[in-house]
C-alpha cells in the first residue's frame, strides 16, 4: 500500500520513462531491465536488488544449461537438470509460503537448518513477492525448455521476472509477450495513449485508496483490520479484495502502457459473471491464463493421450482439480486452500457437464429465458464466492 503513495516511487516511474526515451544502446527490454534494476535499488536498497539480480542470474544459468543440453547431451542429462531446477524452485517457494503461514517458521528453520540464512532469505522473498516470481519462472521454463523460445540476456530477464511496477501484486506477465516487445515499433506518447495511461493509473488509485480503503475504514475503523465473523463480513471481504487487487493491477497496467512493456489486464467485471467458470476468466485473469497455459492444457493433453479420447471427460475433471489445487496452494500452503482449489475445480467440471448436456439437448437460451438465467447465474456466483471467501477468510485475515 505504501509503495504507491510514496512520491519517490512516482519520481522513479517517470524517470524510467524518460530514460527509455533516450537513445541508449540496446533494445527495449534490455534497457527496461537495466533501468528496472536501478529502480529496485533505489526503492528497496542495494542488498535486495543485488539478491534479486543473483537469483535472476542463477535462473538464467539453469535455463541456459538445460536448453544447451538439448542438443549436446542425452535426454537423461537434460531431464535431470530440469528436475533439479524445478526442485530448487519449489524448495524456495515452499520456504516462502511456510514463512507466510507461520510467524514462528523462521526461528524453527534456524534450529532445524542453521546453515540456511533464513533471516536473509525469508524477508527477501516477502519483499519481492516471490509467489509471482515463482510462476514467472515456470512460464519462462515452459517457453524456453519445451516451446524452444529464445532465452533473453540476464538484464532483460530481470525486467521480466522482477518488474518494479508489478512488485506489489502482479499481474502475471507472459514471457513470450515480454520478449516480443522488442519487435513492436516504439509508439509515441500520443494524446490517446496519454489518456489510456492516465485512466488506468487514476482508476487504480481510486479503486485502492478511495473505494477499498474507504470500505475498510467505514466498517472496521481507521486502524481496524477486516475480521470475518459472519456472512456480511465475507461479502465485505470480497468487495474489498476486488477493489484492492484490481486497483494495484490497473496501476501496474497503466505503467506498463507508459513504458511499452506488456502488462496483462487482470480484471474484467467479475461480478457480471454468470458461472464460476466465467468468474475465473474475469478475476485475476493473468493467473487464470497462466494456469491454462502451463498446467491445464499440458496435463489435459498428456492424460488424454494416456487414457484415450473415450475418457476425455474424466481427464478434464482430474485436470481441473489438479490445476485449481495448485491455485489454492499458490495462495497459501494449507489444507483449507487446497480444499478450496479442489472445490472450485469440481464446480467448474460440473458446470462444463451441464453446459455440454444442454448443448446436446439443443436447449434454446434466448430472450426472456436468457435474461432470467443470467440474473440467477450472477446471484449463484456471488453466493458461492461469498461462501468460499468465508471458508478461507481466517487465513487471509487471521482473527
Image (cartoon, rainbow, N blue to C red):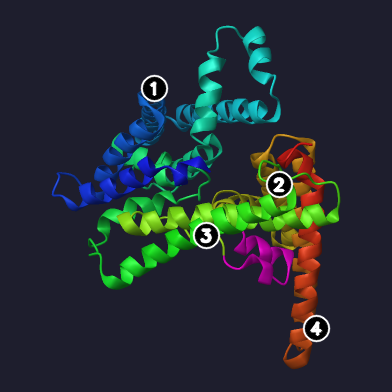
Task: Give the CA separation, mark 3 to mark 4.
Answer: 46 Å
Is residue 209 in sight in this rendering? Answer: yes
Q: Which of marks 3 and 2 is nearer the N terminus?
A: 3
Q: Which of marks 3 and 4 is nearer the N terminus?
A: 3
CB contact under 8 Å: marks 4 and 2 = no
Q: Name the residue under label 1.
A: 47
**Placement of the C terminus among the 4 image quadrants:** top right
Task: Give the CA separation, mark 3 to mark 2.
Answer: 19 Å
244 with respect to 108 (left or right) = left
Disc 2 is placed on an element classified as loop
161 or 69: nearer the viewer: 161
Q: Mark 2 points at which residue?
A: 221
Q: Earlier in the sequence, mark 1 or mark 4?
A: 1
41 with respect to 23 (left or right) = right
Q: Which residue is drawn at 86% across and 51% down?
A: 230
Task: Give the CA separation, mark 1 to mark 4.
Answer: 63 Å
Q: Name the residue under label 4.
A: 361
Q: Name the residue under label 3.
A: 206
323 or 262: nearer the viewer: 262
Q: Is the magenta stretch mostly helix, strand or loop?
A: helix
Amino acid at each position: 500500500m505504501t509503495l504507491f503513495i510514496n512520491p519517490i516511487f512516482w519520481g522513479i516511474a517517470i524517470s524510467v520513462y524518460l530514460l527509455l526515451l533516450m537513445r541508449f544502446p540496446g533494445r527495449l527490454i534490455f534497457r527496461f531491465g537495466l533501468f528496472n534494476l536501478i529502480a529496485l535499488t533505489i526503492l528497496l536498497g542495494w542488498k535486495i536488488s543485488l539478491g534479486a539480480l543473483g537469483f535472476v542470474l542463477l535462473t538464467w544459468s539453469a535455463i541456459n544449461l538445460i536448453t544447451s543440453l538439448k542438443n549436446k547431451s542425452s535426454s537423461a542429462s537434460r531431464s535431470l537438470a530440469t528436475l533439479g531446477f524445478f526442485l530448487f524452485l519449489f524448495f524456495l517457494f515452499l520456504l516462502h509460503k511456510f514463512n507466510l503461514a507461520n510467524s514462528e517458521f523462521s526461528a524453527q528453520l534456524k534450529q532445524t537448518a542453521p546453515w540456511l540464512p533464513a533471516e536473509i532469505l525469508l524477508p527477501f522473498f516477502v519483499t519481492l513477492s516471490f509467489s509471482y516470481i515463482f510462476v514467472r519462472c515456470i512460464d519462462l521454463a515452459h517457453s524456453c525448455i519445451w516451446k524452444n523460445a529464445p532465452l533473453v540476456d540476464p538484464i532483460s530477464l530481470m525486467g521480466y521476472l522482477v518488474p518494479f511496477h508489478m512488485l506489489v501484486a502482479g499481474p502475471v506477465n507472459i514471457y513470450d509477450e515480454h520478449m516480443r516487445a522488442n519487435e513492436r515499433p516504439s509508439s509515441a506518447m500520443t494524446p490517446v495513449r496519454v489518456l489510456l495511461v492516465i485512466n488506468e493509473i487514476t482508476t487504480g488509485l481510486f479503486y485502492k485508496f478511495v473505494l477499498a480503503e474507504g470500505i475498510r475504514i467505514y466498517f472496521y475503523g481507521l486502524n481496524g483490520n477486516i475480521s470475518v465473523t459472519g456472512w456480511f463480513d465475507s461479502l465485505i471481504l470480497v468487495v474489498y479484495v476486488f477493489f484492492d487487487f484490481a486497483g494495484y493491477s490497473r496501476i501496474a497496467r497503466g505503467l506498463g502502457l507508459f513504458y511499452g512493456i506488456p502488462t496483462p489486464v487482470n480484471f474484467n467485471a467479475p461480478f457480471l459473471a454468470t458461472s464460476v467458470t466465467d468468474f475465473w476468466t474475469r478475476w485475476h485473469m493473468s493467473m487464470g491464463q497462466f494456469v491454462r497455459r502451463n498446467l491445464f492444457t499440458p496435463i489435459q493433453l498428456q492424460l488424454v493421450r494416456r487414457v484415450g479420447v473415450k475418457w476425455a471427460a474424466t481427464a478434464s475433471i482430474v485436470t481441473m482439480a489438479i490445476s485449481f489445487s495448485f491455485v489454492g496452494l499458490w495462495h497459501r500452503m494449507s489444507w483449507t486452500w487446497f480444499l478450496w482449489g479442489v472445490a472450485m475445480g469440481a464446480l467448474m467440471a460440473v458446470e462444463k457437464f451441464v453446459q455440454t448436456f444442454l448443448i446436446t439437448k439443443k436447449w434454446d437460451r434466448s430472450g426472456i429465458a436468457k435474461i432470467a438465467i443470467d440474473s440467477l447465474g450472477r446471484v449463484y456466483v456471488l453466493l458461492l464466492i461469498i461462501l468460499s471467501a468465508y471458508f478461507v477468510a481466517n487465513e487471509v485475515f487471521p482473527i
